[in-house]
Amino acid sequence: MSEILTNTAARNIFYGGTAFFFVTFAALVAHSVTEVNAFSSQHPVSPSVAKGKEIWERHACIDCHTILGEGAYYAPELGNVWLRYGGRENPEGARAALKSWMQSQPSKIEGRRQMPHFAITDTELDTLVDFLKWTSEINTQNWPPKISG
Amino acid sequence: MLKYKSQHVALYYIVGALGLFLAQIIFGVVLGTIVVQPNFLAELIPFNIARMIHTNALIVWLLMGFFGCAYYLIPEEAERELHSPQLAIIQFWLFLAGGAAAVLGYLFGIHEGREFLEQPLWIKLAIVVVALMFLYNISMTVLKGRRTAITNVLLLGLWGVALFFLFALYNPANLILDKIFWWWVVHLWVEGVWELVMAAVLAFLMIKMTGIDREIVEKWLYVIISLTLFSGILGTGHHYYWIGTPAYWQWIGSVFSTIEVLPFFAIVLFTFMMVWKGGRTHNNRAALLWSLGCSVFAFFGAGVWGFLHTLSSINYYTHGTQITAAHGHLAFYGAYVMLNIALFTYAVPNLLQREPAHQLLNMWGFWLTSAGVLFMTFALTIAGVVQTHLQRVMGLSFMEVQEQLSLFYWLRLMGGVVTLLGVILILWSLLNPVVQHLRSTQAQRA
Ligand code: HEM
Ligand code: HEM
Ligand SMILES: [Fe+2]
């Protein structure tokens, strides 16, 4: 190997190649961000959705649940929970059902995984639902394959 | 044996890292128990809190270990004392206090809510300060001393760690953008800059333990890290399949993340060739075992288990299932846990200026821990295949499917307990000589 490739050449290839791939990557991400912004102008992140995301983070739902497949694997996928609760056909019903789900936890069923009770006000619950509804509108290339998440 | 007095600061980091390692594993076993016995501790430590302690302890101790590795090997490579050993000790206590404050806060529900980045903002800022103290210290040492390929790559990797961590401070209200840049920390760490650290530390260990020519090692090093970044940067695309990003990532992510297997394979070739060609048998056989084990387990955990679900057509079904958890465990263990233990095992006798002790015990720790993690990985992989089929193909609900998996979760817990036992052996073999050393120096003083 020593004749074909000197150490200096190897180092220069490394620096040059890394710069090239990083710039390519950054350009592609920049393009993706403009696409995301285009999507978000159709589906704006309203103050309520933003507030809902804050509530989502305050209680670290992500460390039990996945959202769009990322997070913890202890509890159901929530990226499409709005659709699973029939939000597309009956938004009022889905909202009421999600809110009452949140309020009725923990189930206290022996041997069943538990979701804690969270001190969340009624208006905060509405923002949380708005956040989940907004998330369900994201173009996920048809993921997940089944409504079960 | 210890060429530079200031290398001694590495010992703080090694002991601190090992303590956190134990805490991480204990919380892992707690998590594994909650999964099979959901009412266990459900009120006291809910799953999400235990999980953030488990994963954060892992990341903090691995980073602490990297700091220790750097403080140990940089003086030898640069052929001079550390710029400021005092600063290194202050940095250690600050980092430890930050980590402890974070964990304590988690227990009281004080946290932010993104996976792995749960640290409150002020802890994140403290981490940045700690990183800057560290980078200043080692960069000054290297600038004033001998420059080698190893210090070059190590420094580049560690600067990269700090740079990409800055994206942890960016948390937009738009979930899609949040996810895009969250991966700039998570993926570009473990499949980017951390791999540079891994390659540099293994290269150092190979030079020290096999006596092979530095020229040869350095060329391997540049080839390996070229493969790493040429594939790993665009390989980030394997996380941009289903999060609201354009469809072209399915091609880019699939192709480049498949190539990510190559550097891990090259590392296996590298370590085995060096040991084979070097022909010298170093008296620290345990450290050699960990070094070779690291390259092999990283290849399987990151390379094989990563490839298993990295093609978009497969990831469509496996995304966010127990397959991911299986891969996450074997990859982190093989690449970064084993790397740290390899250097600790090599460095501790030198730092204490004595012959390697408890070699057999340490190697038992190696086999027991590795067997435990492998067993967990297999159990989760089968669970993941069953889950994928029932939930993603048949469309059964999440909770129904989980009930079908309980056997595998029991097996995973068994593997976890074996892991815990192995870790106790490792800790004993490394820390017992440190304790003895402290006792004898105290006796001398008295
Ligand atoms: C070397 C040892 C270990 C390493 C490197 C490690 C690493 C990790 C990582 C990286 C995650 C996050 C996984 C992901 O997001 O895909 C995780 C989660 C987890 N770990 Fe470990 N871990 C270790 C040991 C253990 C042990 C001994 C147990 C006990 C059985 C355990 C149980 C768990 C559980 C239950 C989760 C949560 C998975 C979920 O979200 O459902 N881990 N660990
Ligand atoms: C040492 C290197 C690596 C480590 C420590 C590592 C660790 C992890 C962890 C912890 C996750 C879960 C992240 C989350 O919580 O969402 C993950 C996800 C993933 N990793 Fe790796 N990984 C490594 C290398 C690789 C490689 C080389 C490949 C491909 C060949 C790969 C493919 C994947 C894929 C496709 C996912 C997404 C899984 C999903 O869709 O749920 N990884 N990795
Ligand atoms: Fe990745």
Image (cartoon, helix red, strand yellow):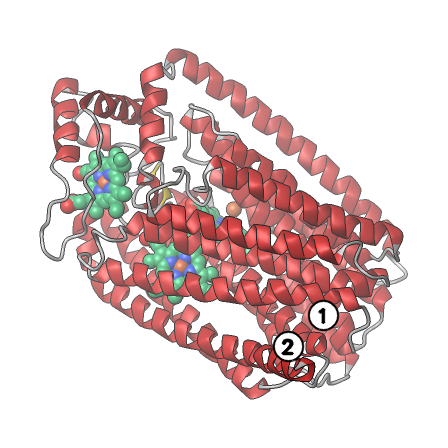
Which structural element holds mark 1? helix
Q: Amino acid at mark 1?
A: Leu
Q: Residue furthest top?
A: A41
Which structural element holds mark 2? helix
Q: Residue at x 81, y 56 (%)?
A: B149
Q: Quadrant of the N terminus of chain B?
A: bottom right
Do the numbered discs 2 and 1 sit on residues whose CB atoms are within 8 Å?
yes
Query: What numbered label is drawn on residue B205?
Result: 1
- Of residue B126 and residue A68, the one placed in the foreground of this image is B126
Q: Chain of mark 1?
A: B
- Of residue B105 and residue A65, the one placed in the foreground of this image is B105
Q: Quadrant of the C terminus of chain B?
A: bottom right
Q: Viewed as shown, does residue B154 lie left or right of A81?
A: right
Q: Quadrant of residue B421?
A: bottom left
In the rendered image, residue B114, in percent from the top left (x then y), is placed at 41, 38
Q: Viewed as shown, does residue B34 lie left or right of B426?
A: left
- Residue B17's place in the image compared with B421, above or below, is above
Q: CA distance from mark 2 to mark 1?
A: 9 Å
| Pointer 2 or 1: first along the chain | 1
Q: Amino acid at mark 2?
A: Ala
Q: Residue at x 30, y 42 (%)?
A: A65
